[in-house]
Amino acid sequence: MTTIRTRFAPSPTGFMHVGAARTALFAWLLARQAGNNGTFILRIEDTDKQREVEGSIAHIGDSLQWLGVQWDEGIAVGGPHQPYIQSERLEIYKEWAQRLVDAGRAYADPYSPQELDAFREKAKAEKRPFLYRDHRPEQPPAWDGSQPLRFKSNPQNYTWHDAVMGELSSGEEAIDDFIIIKSDGYPTYNFCHIVDDAIMEVTHVLRSQEFLSSTPKFLNLYDALKLKRPVLATLPFVMAIDGKKKLGKRDGAKDILDYGKEGYLPEAMVNFLATLGWNDGTEQEVFTTDELIKTFSLDRVQKSPARFDEQRFLWLNGQHIRALSLEELSKRVEPFWPESARSADPEYRLKVLSLAQDRLKTLADLPALTQYFFEEPAIDWSLVDGNKQLKKLSPAQQKELLQAALDVLASQTDWSAASIQETLNQLLEKTGQKPGILFSLVRIATTWAPFSPALDETLAILGKETVQNRLTQAVSDPR
């Protein structure tokens, strides 16, 4: 099998969002698919010090680990090409830059910012695009590091294959002289990522669509450095749900780790990210990580942007919660239990969790679904009044039905879910009521919650004494 080496190379400029996490995931899946012949690298591109946010590097690592996206080489774990933080590799970039200088393919930029502005204004006045190469100095000064170093481009037409976008091409107007080393000694992204990919033997470069217009410049630099091009794969944008703009903070592009705090499972996030713009050609929507590793391929990534549908993510999360064993789920929900449940008997909590599992959309739903199992709920008749069917009954009729339920349940000797259900069914026949009325009324009066799991199982776990007490309180409560 061909050796596959992929990388994720984020800038530490803030939290990890959905778009960046998807890029990392796709690169990781590609490497994992290759088994022992695959390597996933985590490299930090921190050459823009003005935009760097303190703590971002640790946050990037924490985000990937939460997703289960473990890297084989890179920060914290090391590897044969360390260091993996670009600000610690400055001498390497200077050496490669000097190669270009010696080959006549880079030169010191002698112009001041004011002179460059004047060139741009003149081009604008003449209604033509500004190209720096039109102003190359005939005799540039020797490069001593005090001035920016520019790549001397060789404008030409390019045709290349993108593993996602297919056959692409560009004209020579897309290529210009660009800065490769800034006056502060730090390299630019356009230069150092190509150097690092070459040194680290990266075979596949996956990146966002925003870099597509820069690809001709990269190709020109590959040629100048006599480097073999890696496989290039451009991932379309993740768009807001309306599909009209790139996903932003206002549309849900929040910190990946915040989803974990909100009760989303990492495997659900992986499933969601993987299917943002990719499918395996089937109708399957719920994937385990192992299934994704087996089926993922770049040629199934869509060329058009994907839409961030948080409702679909919520649905997927519920599917993954239901797929967990009860033992595993109990570990995951530990931080989400209501305070009143923390001192409860572990076996009782497990019974409650078993009942709630099918209704959980996120782990954070647990308190609302279970609190009434561990503490006495406050009576709230608005839950009855807000029910379309129950509000047709007068308060006296409601209490009459609750008293009837109390009477039959008080004489119940077998307090199992099946026996309780049989008793309630008999009460339905006796009262002539619909299940939507009788069962809803009993459910609300014993939980005082807007929703709850199956009534028979809820009553069975609450216990006979608790159910009797709550029904008695509801009947005697002045409306």
Image (cartoon, rainbow, N blue to C red):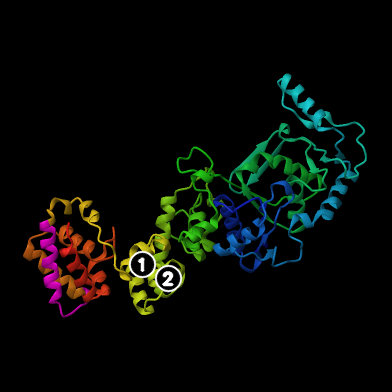
In the rendered image, residue 140, in percent from the top left (x then y), is placed at 91, 35
**Residue range of the region highlighted in magenta in the rendering:** 396-417
Q: Is residue 477 left or right of residue 90?
A: left
Q: Was residue 411 drawn as part of the magenta stretch in this picture?
A: yes
Up the image or down, 421 lies above or below 258; here it is: below
For marks 1 and 2, the one nearer the N-term is: 2
Question: In the image, what residue occupies the spot 20% across and 52% down?
Answer: 385
In the rendered image, residue 293, in percent from the top left (x then y), is placed at 54, 63
Q: Which residue is mark 1?
A: 357
Camera-nearest residue between 139 and 144: 144
Q: Main secondary structure of the magenta part?
A: helix
Question: In the image, what residue occupies the spot 16% across and 58% down?
Answer: 437
Q: Is residue 8 left or right of residue 198?
A: left
Question: In the image, what residue occupies the spot 90% across and 42% down?
Answer: 143
In the rendered image, residue 237, in percent from the top left (x then y), is placed at 55, 44
Question: In the image, what residue occupies the spot 74% across and 45% down?
Answer: 190
Q: Which residue, as the protein is rendered here, is positioned at the far top?
A: 126
Q: Which residue is mark 2?
A: 329
Q: How many marks?
A: 2
- What amino acid is found at the position of numbered circle 1 in the picture? Gln
Q: Label 2, secondary structure: give it.
A: helix
